[in-house]
Amino acid sequence: MDEMTDADESGPDGGMSHGSEESAKLQLGQIVRERREQSGLSLNALAAESGVSTGLLSQLERGHGNPSYNTLIKLAHALGVRVGDFFGGQDPEPKLAELVRAQSRRRLLLSERDMVYELITPSMNGRLGMIRAQVAAGWSNESVPFRHEGEECVLVVEGSLKVVVGGEHYRLGEGDSLTYEASVPHWYANDGDRPTVFVGAMTPPSY
């Protein structure tokens, strides 16, 4: 079931302030609308293609509420774009070296508590992409697996993570990593009782 709720203003994990939260909602809505229009889809057509209701899509495009992470995966599949295209913020001009401060990472705007997806690299338009993810206890994207070009590696920093690649199941604990062909459908699950933190790297940045 798709979710879209208003997020808290700011939390102990250093979340966005109310003002920046509202700005991020509007920006995400603009990104979704632009991608939909570029694909030549109406709201009803995108709803049918993605399985996300027309009402939720309308709310999202108008900057009201945050989508669940699985909703973003569904929209990415339907629009033929990367989930990473929904990261807000302006891509920096290419430089010899680009510093990204921990407190300045670009985030996906999500409705779920304890779900945080941050971009470690400056953008998704270089030769390498890296993310840091905090996955809530009990979360899974089995119903909407990832599939994209390139090679991917995940490294568990805290907790444990189940990763399924092409039907093969892998259990990763702290310090474990898994590298796989990302064009094969793959999904994650945190069936533990606390959030899991992992770092993901992909080349090219096709997440």
Image (tube, rainbow, N blue to C red):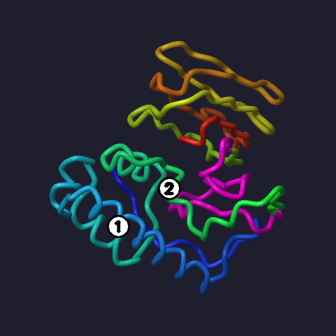
Real-space CA distance between mark 1 and mark 2, rounded to the nearest whole angstrom:
11 Å
What residue is shown with label 1?
34
Classify residue 78 as left or right of residue 147: left
At label 2, which amino acid type do we have? Answer: Asp
At label 1, which amino acid type do we have? Answer: Glu
Residue 159 located within the stretch drawn in magenta: no
Identify the magenta region. Answer: 101-129
- Mark 2 Cα-neighbour bin, 10 Å: few <14, some 14–19, many ≥20: some
- Asked if labels 2 and 1 touch by Cβ distance under 8 angstroms, the answer is no
Total numbered labels: 2
Quick one: quadrant of the C terminus? Answer: top right
Above or below, 177 against 31 in this view is above
Q: Which of 142 and 103 is in front in this view?
A: 103
Classify residue 141 as left or right of residue 94: left
- Mark 1 Cα-neighbour bin, 10 Å: few <14, some 14–19, many ≥20: few
**Which residue is pictured at 49% across the width and 59% down the height?**
86
Q: Nearer the viewer, residue 123 or 75?
A: 123
Classify residue 30 as left or right of residue 83: left
Above or below, 43 against 147 in this view is below
Q: Magenta-highlighted stretch: main secondary structure?
A: loop
**Which residue is pictured at 48% across the width and 26% down the height?**
183
Give the quadrant of residue 93: bottom right
Q: Residue 16: x percent and y percent?
A: 66, 75
Q: Which residue is farthest bottom?
A: 19
Above or below, 96 against 139 in this view is below
What residue is shown with label 2?
85
Element under label 1?
helix
Residue 110 located within the stretch drawn in magenta: yes
Q: Residue 55: x percent and y percent?
A: 24, 67
Give the quadrant of residue 40: bottom left
Q: Residue 128: x percent and y percent?
A: 68, 42
Give the quadrant of residue 95: bottom right
